[in-house]
Image: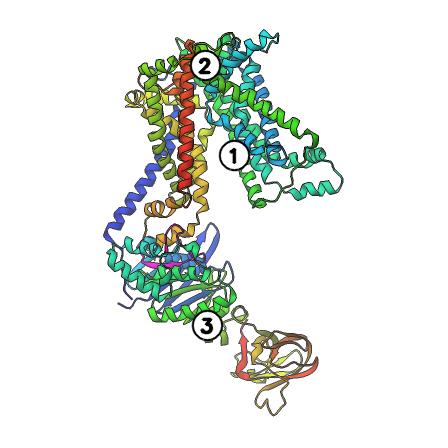
Amino acid sequence: MQMYQTAQSSKDWSLFLERSLQSLVAFICVALVLVPLAPLFIQAFIDRPLYDSGWQLSLQGFHELFTSPQVAQVTWNTLYFMVMTSTLSMVLGIGAAVLIGRTNLPLAEALHSFSRWPIYISAIVLAIGWTIVYGPSGYITILLRQIGISTGNLYSLEGIALVSAVSHAPVTLIYAIGSVRQQDSSLENAALVSGAGPFTILRKITLPLMRPAIIFCVIMNVVTSLESFAIPLVLGGPHGIDLIASYIYRAGFSAITPNYPLVAAAAVTLVMIISALTVMQLFLLRKMSRFTTVVGKAVRQNKFDLGVLRWPVFAIFSLYIIVCILIPMAGVFARAFTHFLTPLIPISSTFTWDNFSVIFSDSGYVRAIKNTLIISFFGGMLSTAIITLIVFVAQRSNFPGRVVLDFLVQFPRAIPGILIGLGLFYAAALLPGGGWLMGTLWILVIAYTMRFLPNGYSIIAPAVMAVSQDLDKAANTMGASWLRVALQIVVPLIKISIFNCYSILFIFSVKEYASAIFLYRQGTEVMGSVLLSFWAQGDSGPVAALAVLQILIVITYAFIAGRFIKGHDRG
Amino acid sequence: MTVANLVVDRLEHTIGAIQILKDICFEIKDGEFFTMIGPSGCGKSTTLMSLAGLLRPTGGSIKLGETFFLDASAKRFVQPQRRNVGLMFQSYALWPHMTVRQNLMFPLKLRKIGKSEANKRIDEVLELVEMLPYSERYPSELSGGQQQRVALGRTLVYGPSLLLLDEPLSNLDAQLRERARLWLRNLQRRTGVTTVYVTHDQSEALSLSDRIAILKKGELVQVGSPIEVYTRPADRFVADFIGKINVLTGTVVDNGSAVRLTSGDVLTLSERQTHADGQTISVGIRPERIVVGATPDVAAGKALIHGQIVESTFEGSKFVHSVQVGQDTVRAETTDAMAPGPVTLSIAPQSIIVFNA
C-alpha cells in the first residue's frame, strides 16, 4: 500500500511555535485579569498615590473608609437600594417568567420579547428616558400635575431602585424562564390529581422547583445592584445621592484632589464582597447545569389556566411594559426631535432636527460615535479572536496551566466595570508605555475585552465542549497540529457560537460606559462617556439624539446579524 | 516497504496510586491482525491510545520498526501527529462539516499531496471501502454502516504504518455487524496493514484475529492464536471470557492421569499431571465438547459420567441443558430436545482443560 509520510523536519519547529502561541494566549488571559487588579490592591495598602515616589505601606485608606461618616451614609444607601431593587427585580423577572412560560396568558411571546428590550438599551439611556418623562419637570409628571395628580420623586433612592429594577429584570427573566420551561409537568399533575388547586400548585410545587434558579438570580441581582453606577449617577446626581460605585467614581475621578488610598480601599472591599458572591453563584451555576442535564429534552408542559384573571393579568403586564419601558423610550425619541418636550406646547410645533445637527457638527460627538463604532466593530473582532483562543487553550490543549485559565476567565465577573477602568488607569500610570496607551483606543479595547471575557467565554466554551474530542484526536493522529485542528475542525463547527459571541461583544461595547469612564481622553471619547458627561452639563436635547443613535446602531446590528444567521443556517 | 514489527516492552501507566497498565509486553508482526480483548477497565483502550500517542504512558517503550514512539527511560515521546498511524474511533469521528471526499482529503493535504494525485488516491480508497458513489455526501446523510466504511477509508487513505481500531463495529446492529466483520477481515488481508483491534466481543476477536491478547486489570494474561486461547486458555478467567466453559473440581487419582469428581465419576486426562494424587484441582470442559446421551460403545475411550437433566432451554440452533452431576451443575448442548431425568455424558480426554489454580 502506498505510504505518504508527513514532513518530519518542519514538525519540531511547528510544535515549538504551537507551545509558544499557547503560552502567549495564557499570558494575555492572565494579564487581562490581573493587570487592572494588582494596582488597585497595591494602592489600597499604601499612603499616597501610586505614581508618587516614596510611598509606604499603610492601612490609612481602610481606616478612613471605615470611619468616614460619608462612607457610612453611602453604605446605608447602597444596602437600602440593594434590598429594594433586588426584591423588585426578582418579583418582576420571576413573575414574568412564570406568566410567560407556564400560563395561558394571551400574546405571551410578544410580551416576552418586549420584556427583554432593556437588555439592548444602555442603563444610562433608560435613566435619561425616565428623567425626560417622569422627572420633576418630565412630560408625564407635568401632564399628571395638570389634572391634579402628583407623582413621587424620581430623584430619590426609591426612584433609582425602581429604574434599576426595570433595567435588571430582563436578565432574571432569561434565567428564570429557562428553569420554568424545563419543569416536568408530571410533578404538577400529581399534585393536581391529589386535589390541589392551581395556586396551591404554583406555591407548593412550581416555585420550589425553581429554587436553584431563584437563588442564582438573587445573588446576580445583589451583585448587579452593588455595581450600579449610571442610574444612580443620572438620577441621584441632582440631589447628591450616592451609592458605592458612583461614590468611587466621584471620589476617584471628578473630585479635585482624589483620595486615592480611600478610593482603592473602597474598590478592594467591593471586589472582595462581589468575589465571594460570585464564587457562590458559579457554584450554583454548576449545580443548575447538572440539574438541567438530568432533566434533558424539553417535556410537554401543561399551562395553568388563569381563568377570569387572564385578560386583567394581560392588561397589567402590558401596562408595565408601556409605562416602564415604552414611554421612557418614546420620551428619548421625542426629546431628540424637539426643542422642548412639554405637554404645554404641542410636539409638532417644537419639532426640529437641530439636536442631530448639533451632534454632527460637534467634532467631540462625531468622534465619540466613530470611536464607539471602531471599538465595537474591530475591537469586538479582536476580543472574539482572543476569547476563542483562550477557550482552545483552556479546553482543548495539553497546556500545563489550562485548568487555572478556565477558572480565571470567570473572575472579571467579580470586578465592577468602573473598577476595571480604575485599575487599568492605575496600571497605565505605572507600566512603561502606559502613558502612550492612555491616549489611544487600545486601552478601551483592552478594558472591554477584559470586561466581557466571561460573557464571551460562556458562549464559546460550551460550544467547544459539545464538539466530541474524538474529532480532534482523529485529526491529530492523521498528522494535524493543535492549531490546525482548532482552526480547520473545531472552528467551522462552532462558527455560529463565535458569531453570537461577536454579536454580544458588539452590542455590549456600543452600550458600555462604566469601564470607559476612567480611561477616555480628549480624542478617545465613546458614546457612553459622552452621554454621561454631557448629561451632567444639562442640555438634554443632543444627549437624547445621541441616545437615539445608540439605539439605532444596536437595532441595525441586530437586524443585519439576524439576516446573517438565517443565511448561514446550514452551518 | 521494509518489514516493521511493533514491539511493546514493559509498558506501564500510573495515575497517582492507581496502576492502569502493568508490565505490558508483546510483539506484533508486520501485516498481522492483533486483537486486544478484556472486560471494561482492563487497559485495552489505554494501550491502544498509547500506541496512537494520544496518551503518554509513564513507563516502558513502544517501537515500530526502528523508530521508538515511546521510550520512557530516555524521555522520548513522539507526538501523535508525527507517528503516521491510523486510528478509527468507535464514534467514527467523521468531521460533520466536510463531505466524504473532504474528510479523506484532509490527511492528504497535511502530507502536501498534489490535488490530482490526492483525488485519484481518494477514488481508489473509496472504491476499496465501497463508498465511491457517496463521495459528495455529508456524514449526516449516511447510514451507520456507511459512516463506518468512510471512517475506515479515511484512516487508510494516507497509508498509515499501523492501523488502530477502537471497537469499530460496536455501533452497528447485530446483522450488519457480522457482515462488516467479514468485510473488514478481507480488507485487512488485501491491504496488508498491521492492525491492532480493540473489542469486548469475544466472537469478533476469534473470527477476525491472527492473534488475541487477553487483558485483565491492566495486565496481559495470555497472547495466542484464536484456537490456542480457546482450547488452551491460560487460566479460568481466559476460559470464561473467551467462550463458555464448565468448571468442575476434583481430586487427582491414578498417578496424575485422571480426576475424580465430587460425584465419584472419574475423568481420564490426556496428559499426566505433575500434581500428586489426592490433590484438589479444577478442570474445564467446553459445553459443545460434551456428548449427551451416549452409550458405552459410542463413548469408547471417553469418560462416561452420570447426571440428571434438571432444566432445558431452547435457543433456536440448539437446546441447552443444565445437568446435575454430584454437587456440580454442568452445561451441555444438543440439537434435539431431551426429556428431564437421568442422562449419561461422555467427555474425551483431550477436551478436558486442567487449570493450575
* In front: label 2 or label 3: 2
Are labels 1 and 2 assigned to the same chain? yes
Q: Is residue A58 visible?
A: no
Residue B307, how many percent across, how many down?
67, 81
Marking on residue B207: 3
Instruction: Please give the range of residues in magenta.
Output: B82-99
Q: Secondary structure at mark 3?
A: helix
Q: Is residue B10 left or right of residue B319?
A: left
User: Marks 1/2: CA distance?
Assistant: 42 Å
x and y, in percent, of residue A395 in the image? 42, 43
Residue A335: assigned label: 2
Question: Seen from this angle, which residue lies furthest right?
Answer: A195
Vertical arrangement, residue B94 with respect to residue A537, above or below: below
Mark 2 surroundings within 10 Å by alpha-carbon count, few (fewer than 14), some (14 through 19), many (20 or more) = many
**Quadrant location of residue A60?**
top left
Is B91 covered by the magenta stretch? Answer: yes
Host chain of mark 3: B
Location of residue A367 in the rendering, given as x and y in whole percent from the top left corner: 32, 19
- Please tell me how many numbered marks the rendered image carries: 3
Provide the major secondary structure of the magenta segment: loop
Real-space CA distance between mark 2 and mark 3, rounded to the nearest whole angstrom: 83 Å
Secondary element under disc 2, as helix, strand or loop, is: helix
